[in-house]
Amino acid sequence: MNRKTVLRGGLICDGSGSEPVPGEILIEGERIAGTGKPGTFRETETDVIDCSGRITAPGFIDAHSHGELRKLRFPDNRSKLLQGVTTEVDGNCGASPSCVPGEVGEMRWADLAGYVRILEERPVSTNTVSLCGHNSIRAAVMGSSSAAPTSGQLKEMQKILEGSFAAGAAGWSSGLTYFPGKFAATEELEALSKTTKGTEKIYATHMRSEGDTLLEAVDEAVRIARAGSERLQVSHLKTIFRRNFHKIDDLLKALEAARSGGMFLHADRYPYIYTSTSIRQALPAPYFFDSDIAPKMRASASLREEVTASLKNCPRDLPTTVIPRLGRDLTELAAEKGVSVEQICAEIIMNNPEETAAYRCMSPENLKRILLTPWVCAGTDGISMPLDDPSDGGHPRAVGSFPRFFRMVADELGIGEAVRKMTSLPAQIFRIPERGLIRPGYTADLVIFDAGKFDSEAGFRGEKRMPVGLDRVMVAGRTAWCSDRPEHVERFGRFIPVS
């Protein structure tokens, strides 16, 4: 017999965009059995959860996650679960280690189907939806080659895509500022996109530029999507560098034009003005395009001097750039060693070009406009990490995006619209079945929170990593986390195939 639970005494925000209303929810087993006005459900042998003074909403859906490997190491996935996230869309920015041969410890897989089996055998706390990443499949087929693929190599990549779709991937992604995706011509991506023709598999892209050639990058993204399913998700929509902040009007106009032309187009965004990517992204051309720049710098003092000098023209604000692992900015690190900011940046690149760096290069005004755009949903662009180990570092978006997104949107557009952007909108975009709304028959992934207190003050130095105002997170009808037992997590997450 399925257990029954009633959520009683609070407000229901159903994810549709409607404002919260008093009501109660009946859960039977894993599903929502019914909703009604206060006092509707009086079944015996029913557990009752008191939600007085709280809002119950659908579990939040992270539209832009990078959790495939880290959630296997940290299966409690507290960094996401304690934001109210119950489902993550992984495989963004062209990086999908789940879709190609990989391993974490003794866990090994050959493809997405194998990765799914691991999640079934070793559940994590949150649900997983997957995208198949272009960078990962290109590297698996071609290594680090900058050449165009041969027809045989292209067919191999298409085969991996098709196999991932058959295993339940919701679509595919690209990361065109990263290796080796940055070597891919538009034609290569169009050829891969054609595998989605006649389907509803989405193309999610970290575009080739978010700065100087931003508008050209939008044109390319639309062109690639048109070659396939005509479903496009623009990842972490932004305008970077002060000299490009004025492009926000043209950016939104171009995307609206594609939507008006019939394209199923949306975007996601995290609520911070710092990006987070590798320190090598600070390099100007031609050094940026050299995948072997670090060993070359170690071998040549003159090249180190050249690179250091070139960093004086870096469009990113190096003095305020933070190294999250250390919880310190380049100004502090340079002062410690008695060198310039450019010198310390070059040293880090030389020793570890993939060191994560957070750059303050976005406009608060543009951020607000993007967050309030109706077709933009919430995403963390974050990894899974423990909350009790500040030395693990990381951008605060990984632990604070959803409460912060809620605050910024709800204060302007109301609670109902903020919740919609965190629930039913991403479910609609990625076609995630039976999630994102509080409706009879839907899976009972739910969050219970105090709308007046739900917030995050997480920073780059490991401070205040745990959001406040969250009472309970339910996954498939069972409590995965509760504020009464904050150290305890249950792992009820599963892989959600998208047909």
Image (cartoon, helix red, strand yellow):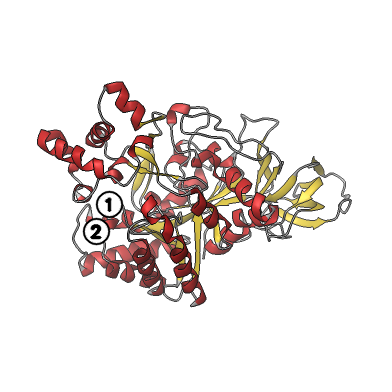
Disc 2 and disc 1: Cα gap in Å? 7 Å
**Which of 80 and 122 lies nearest the eye of the viewer?**
80
**Which of 131 and 27 lies nearest the eye of the viewer?**
131
Which of the 4 image quarters holds residue 372?
A: bottom right
Is residue 76 among the parts visible in the rendering? no
Res 357 label: none
Which of the 4 image quarters holds residue 346?
A: top left
Mark 1 nearby-residue class (10 Å; few <14, some 14–19, many ≥20):
many
The location of residue 207, given as percent across then percent down, is 37, 59
Give the residue pinned by disc 2: 183
**Which of 461 and 8 lies nearest the eye of the viewer?**
461
Mark 2 nearby-residue class (10 Å; few <14, some 14–19, many ≥20):
some
Which residue is pictured at 78% across the width and 46% down the height?
Answer: 5
The location of residue 224, given as percent across then percent down, is 36, 70
The location of residue 182, given as percent across then percent down, is 27, 57
- The three-letter code of the residue at mark 1 reads Phe
Secondary structure of the residue carrying tag 1 is loop
- The three-letter code of the residue at mark 2 reads Phe
Res 179 label: 1
Q: Determine contact: label 2, label 1, CB under 8 Å.
A: yes
Is residue 215 among the parts visible in the rendering? yes
In the image, taking residue 449 as reference, residue 461 lies left or right, namely left
In the image, taking residue 412 as reference, residue 241 lies left or right, namely left
How many labels, in total?
Answer: 2
Which residue is pictured at 49% across the width and 54% down the height?
Answer: 366
Secondary structure of the residue carrying tag 2 is helix
Relative to 82, residue 195 above or below:
below
Which residue is pictured at 15% across the width and 36% down the height?
Answer: 305
In the image, taking residue 295 as reference, residue 9 lies left or right, namely right
The location of residue 296, given as percent across then percent down, is 14, 39
**Which of 498 and 29 lies nearest the eye of the viewer?**
498
